[in-house]
Amino acid sequence: MMGCFRITGRLCLVVAMAMMTSSCSIFDWFDSKPEASKSVKPVVEKPSGWTFFHQWSVENVNPSMQSLVPGESMTLTGQCSFSAEMLELLEAKPKGLLVPVIKVTRDLTLAPDLENSARLYKALRSEFPLGGVGDSLTFYQTLLSSIEHTCPANMTRDIDSCQFKKWMSFAGLNDESSIYDEHRLKRWFKSHSSLKYMIMGSSDLFNSDALLSARYSANSRVITEQPMSVRDKSIRPYLGKVRFDWVVPANGGKTTFNSLGSCTLNWKELEEKRRLNGPGWMETTSLAEVNKVLLLYFIELMSEATKAMPEHTR
């Protein structure tokens, strides 16, 4: 009996020890959190970009256009492409600024097209909250004024500060990397801080030397006197199609205006002939006429594009 007790006692001791050790693991199981319950930082999904494509045919009733590309109709191809960054900005419903539409004159100088600026403004404001017309005009004036204050060569009027700039250049202190006086533009942006972005005709155009041949108005003097050949070369890359960019100031970057999205309108038959005949096939003045015709259809394109904008930006 005692032997049995000893065996049973030993067995009880072993069982007790096993229970004690196993109970630790049981308690640990209750105390430890399962892997799934560990805190994980939520991943915020950024919106993807947005594209829009629209193609339609219109009757070619313009004699000058028929002489360029014979045919009873014109196939127009429009496309918009906005970055995720632009959509994120628009979602906050900020105010934007429509820079006046630029028209190209027969002598290849640039001037504000107020009539078509008003048409485009009406087409855009249903989707994009825009600053007042006064803001658009004052910004354009500031833009050209800032070009003049960099004192480019062949200016058509004298500015006293340019005498000081000449002295600085002799001293090696004048190193302008932009056609604009960036400080003047920054002051304007700071005083209009509610305007978070701009809509302008081709940011590449506004970042280029072509703006040296701009005018404050259709009847004012041009900023600089340039030979026709120089004006032709500087403006030609931006003609033959219509493009507008949604931009933000680059704030000291490589370019003054940084594009976050754009809408473009092409004339399909014209583009095919240009590819076939080479880039120099058409006169630059003729390409400027194409832009005048396409601009009205571009405004039509924008009426369609704004209806198709993503819901979260409305």
Image (tube, grey):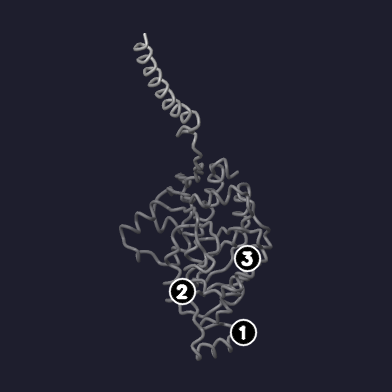
Q: CA distance from mark 3 to mark 2?
A: 29 Å
Q: Which residue is mark 3?
A: 189
Category of crowding for the residue at label 2, using alpha-carbon neighbours closer than 10 angstroms: few (below 14), some (14–19), many (at least 20):
many
Residue 272 can be seen, yes or no: yes
- The crowd level at tag 1 (other Cα within 10 Å; few <14, some 14-19, many 20+) is few
User: Residue 159: x and y, percent?
Assistant: 61, 84
Determine the residue located farthest toward the front in the rendered image: 2
Name the spot of residue 222 as percent of width and height, x first. 56, 76
The residue where tag 2 is placed is 231
Taking the image as shown, residue 217 lies to the left or right of residue 172, namely right
* Picture disc at residue 148: none
Mark nearer the viewer, 3 or 1:
3
Q: CA distance from mark 1 to mark 2?
A: 23 Å
Give me the C-alpha separation between circle 3 and circle 1. 23 Å
Is label 3 or label 2 in front?
Answer: 3
- Marks 3/1 in contact by CB < 8 Å: the verdict is no
Q: Label 1 amino acid?
A: Ile
Q: Amino acid at mark 2?
A: Arg
Residues packed near mark 3 inside 10 Å, few (<14), some (14 to 19) or many (20 plus): some
Q: Does residue 116 lie above or below 152 as drawn?
A: above
Q: Could you say whether the residue bearing mark 2 is in a helix, strand or loop?
A: helix
Residue found at x 45% / y 69%: 235
Q: Which residue is label 1 attached to?
A: 159
Task: Say how many tags the image has.
Answer: 3
Residue depicted at 48% across the width and 49% down the height = 80
Q: Secondary structure beneath disc 3?
A: helix
Farthest top residue in view: 1
Amino acid identity at mark 3: Phe
